Amino acid sequence: MPLAVVPTPIGNLEDITLRALRYLREADLVACEDTRRTGRLLAHYGIKKDMLAVHEHNEDRLAEGLADRAWTERVALVSDAGMPLVSDPGYRLVAACIEAGVGVEVLPGPSAPVTALVASGLPADAVVFLGFPPRKGRDRTELLARIAREPSTFVLFESPHRLAKTLGDLPRAAPVAVCRELTKLYEEVFRGTAGEAAEHFSGPVKGEVVLVVRGGAASAPPSLEDAVERARGYVAAGEGPSKAAARAAREAGLKKRDVYERVAKG
């Protein structure tokens, strides 16, 4: 029978599908990143299951054995939050199952990178997910240069303690969205330029952070289409059309009138 890859809520416990709950109830074994955290989720829904901790320190050792068990047992793979494998453990287990000929069934569900991307209001046609950026050294320098050069939308995880530094290292004019504590009580989505975000988050920051960046700020000035798109994003977030157009035009170095005319037409 196939290994079931089951996404779990990234914050709000209501964000779990009926199908995910059914698979967890039917599982013989739940392979999870942290048995304590998964145990709380299962208890919330009245589910009692055998659990096995599978994390970055033991996955290599356990993957082959779990793949063998999946031939005869219903094994569900979860991570602490969101979709397993996406900056979380699970890749080696899935690869071992594929190599052994065991089916892999992936359920759709919560994902912090996708949630942040949609909330950002930035283009979603060409997207690069980077996980956590390198803290220092050549790898970090090359990554920042790529973001500055490449006109894609980049999605990153970042520690709240390093957020200000990363924002400060980006081109000041780069459009960004800082998504903090998604789906939780104190959710915050800040949209603006990297320079504006650096000022906004200059003090202590708490919670989990997803950073969305519109790349290419160093290679070409923002086009009118980019400015109009950003203004529409500001309107969708609650700003009036005039204020949104003025803000987007200022950030792009364009005339407010040109942006506002396009925004007003819808």
Image: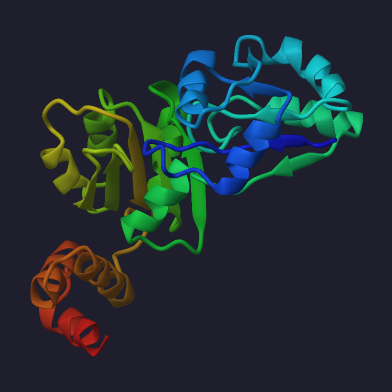
Front one among 36 and 171: 36
Work out which residue is located at the far front of the displayed protein and give it: 46
Residue pictured at 48% horizontal, 14% vertical? 36
Give x and y (percent) for residue 73: 82, 25
The image quadrant of residue 33 is top right
Left or right position of 175 against 51:
left
The image quadrant of residue 96 is top right
User: Can residue 146 be seen in this snapshot?
Assistant: no
Q: Is residue 135 above or below residue 106?
A: above
Front one among 5 and 90: 5
User: Can residue 175 be seen in this snapshot?
Assistant: yes
- If the image is split into quadrants, where does the C terminus sit? bottom left
Left or right position of 53 against 81:
right
- If the image is split into quadrants, where does the N terminus sit? top right
Give x and y (percent) for residue 251: 17, 62
Give x and y (percent) for residue 78: 60, 29
Residue pictured at 19% horizontal, 86% vertical? 264
Q: Is residue 225 above or below residue 46?
A: below
Front one among 185 and 148: 185
Left or right position of 262 against 243:
right
Give x and y (percent) for residue 260: 16, 81
Left or right position of 112 against 19:
left
Q: Is residue 168 above or below residue 264?
A: above
